Each structure stands twice: as structure tokens, then as C-alpha cells.
Amino acid sequence: MGEERATVDPKLLEILVCPLTKEPLRYDAERQELISDKAKLAFPIRDGIPIMLPDEARPLEEGEAR
Amino acid sequence: MTQRAAQPDGAAVFDRAAVRAHRDRAAAGFAGRGDFLVREVGERLVGRLDDVKRRFDRVLDLGCHSGQLGPMLRRQTAPDLLIEADLSPAMVACATSPARLVADEEWLPIRADSLDLVVSALSLHWVNDLPGALVQIRQALRPDGLLLAAMLGGETLFELREAFLQAEAGQEGGARPHVSPFPDVQTLGALLQRTGFALPVVDSDRITVTYESAEALMHDLRAMGEANAASGRARHFARRATFRAAADRYRETFGGADGRIPATFQVLYLTGWRPHESQQQPARRGSGTLGLTQVLSPRER
């Protein structure tokens, strides 16, 4: 790890959806988050591992959803 | 989360936070110390693919623990994509597939029609909404995709259950559940059918492990991350006197001549397919050529 950031497997990214709405997710590479606009939640990616638990997601700020 | 309102806390059978905490705590030493049952069941589960003549390119190991099934699945089907998922981040961190995620079986984050095979070894018995989880798995499978799951059944740890019942009957104001409630074959068969799986099959298998003592068994259950997480469990450890009484009852009732005690794990194997037209189908209604009376009373023809 160190400087090199672990990335999410692209084939996995392709089939991940929001666990609540089952809608596609937006990948924010900068913040390492998977964003569900409809559920207004951002799911964190830690060390290349998406944490797809509704309880651990960050609620989106006002105006952050697209 | 308000989304959980459909299942109010008071009604949940299992404390999912406890399930996760037990797994998180067991993760570091799981390989080697706590994984014998998962490896054994995993071999039996994956071995069932020997009889299936098709390739499985996209595979999900749901409730992967620290990655016990990964090498077995790679050897068996050489999938294009193997996803390892578990409720416990600490377990997932120990798994080795490039495609890993932390996920709750009750909130499956997988796109519809995207998997060829979902395998799950010894995780679904901790799910509160099993019908909901099965429906989500079926949706995530492609048509003709396969679910192959193993979960603990109702006869699991019956010796421990009975020993505590006997010991607590006269103490602490009555018995508390020390062992989780588990489903049985009939219930699961009906459930697979009801949740839309084709050609559903459920069968049962018993694995008996012997221990030096009840303490050694309890220690092992914690190492396996399988300590009781039923919502109605006693929140504190049993009183020393109660535990000793239960340990004594256990040995008296079930102990062998060699002084060791047996612990039974009933494993229920679930098989079901996402429906597809290539599968064997029941005959169309009204397509029969024999009258019912002919079938029921052949001698009166």
C-alpha cells in the first residue's frame, strides 16, 4: 500500500449497484466513494474494498446528488 | 437507517451487529483455528459442481469468511470473476481475490442478471430476512444461474442446547436460548420454491466433532465466529455455577467412554436455479392424455 492506492477491480465495479435502490453507482475516484444519487448515500472504498453497508454509508450533502 | 423500518429491531431474530462483531473478532486467527467447519462444508459444497456440466464465469462467494472457498472455486470452475463478500470487514481484509467487498446478505449490492453462480458456506443461518436474501440472490443470477448454499440446521448443537436447558431449569429463573434457532429441510425447500428458484433441492448432512470439554467447545465456537447472536440471548456470560452444571449435564448425557463429548453440526445444503427455458419443465396444464380416474383406479378401466 503506502503511496500506491489500492483500486477496485473494474469487473467488480461494473456489476455493483446500490444495495437499497439497486440502481447504478457513480464512482468518485478522488474521494474513493461509490455514490448512490437516488438513496443519497456515498459508500466508502477502503484499501480497494467497497463497503456496501447502508449503516456505514455517508449521507450526501445538500446539492451533492446529481 | 430508516430503510430498516420494514423490519423493526424488536422483531429481528438475529442481532446483525453481533454477527459482524463475532466475525470481526474471529478474523485474525480464523484460518487454521476457526475455519475447519467452513473448509469441510466448502469442499462438500464445491464438490457438487462436479456433476454440473457447464462453466461458471462470474462467481460470488457470499459470506466468504476469510477466503476459505476461493482456492476451491478457482480450482473447480476457473471463473473469470470471483467476488468474495462478507458482512465482516476484518474477514474480507484476509481474503485474497482482487474483487472483494463488504456486503450484507440482506442488502445485496449486485446488479440483476449478472452472476452465473452464487456460493454461500455457513453464513445464511445468521440472516433475519432469509426470503428477502434469497429473492435478491435469484435476481442477481443470470437465467440458468445456480445458487449453492450451506447453512446450519435445527439439529445443530442439540447437545449443548439440552445441557443448558437441564442446567438452567432450576436456576437463574428459567432457561435462556444459548444456541441460535435454525431452520429445517422442509421450511427451506418451500422457501426456495416460494422465492422463485427452479429445481430446488435441500438435503441435510451431519458433522460430529468431539471435544475434550464444554469449555473447549465454547472456545471453538468463538474462534469460528459462531457464538450465539440471537436477539433473545442472555447478554452476559452464564453464571459460573450454571455453566459448570451445564458442562456436567453435557458429559453425563452425551459423553463417550473416552471422556470426550460430541458436538453435532447439522448442515443443510440448498440448490436452486434461476429459471430458464432450457430446464426441465412440468407439463402444460391440460396436456395430459390419461383421465385421472384411470390413474387413481386402474383396475376399474
Image (cartoon, coloured by chain):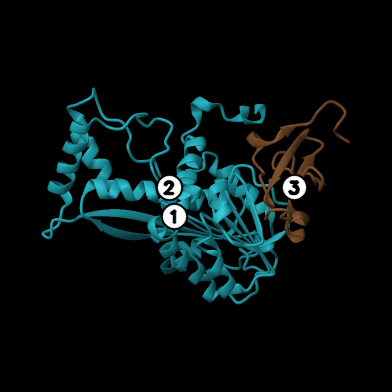
Q: Specify whether residue B154 is in view.
A: no
Apparent side of residue A11 relative to residue B10 in the rendered image (left or right):
right
Apparent side of residue A50 relative to residue B246 in the rendered image (left or right):
right
In the structure shown, which secondary structural element does the residue marked by tag 3 occupy?
loop
On whether disc 2 and disc 1 are found on a single subunit, the reply is yes
Q: Where residue A52 sits: x, y (%)?
A: 67, 44
Q: Chain of mark 1?
A: B
> Which amino acid does the dot numbered 3 rest on?
Val
Tags 2 and 1 touching, CB below 8 Å: yes
Tags 1 and 3 touching, CB below 8 Å: no
Q: Residues within 10 Å of mark 1 (few under 14, many from 20)?
A: many
Q: Is residue B11 above or below residue B194?
A: above
Q: Chain of mark 3?
A: A
> Which amino acid does the dot numbered 1 rest on?
Phe
The residue wearing badge 1 is B30
Q: Chain of mark 2?
A: B
The residue wearing badge 3 is A17
Q: Which chain is tinted brown?
A: A
Q: Where residue A64 sits: x, y (%)?
A: 85, 32
Give chain B's shade. Answer: cyan
Please state which of the two labelled residues, at mark 3 or mark 2, is closer to the viewer: 2
Q: Is residue A6 above or below residue B88?
A: below
The residue wearing badge 2 is B225
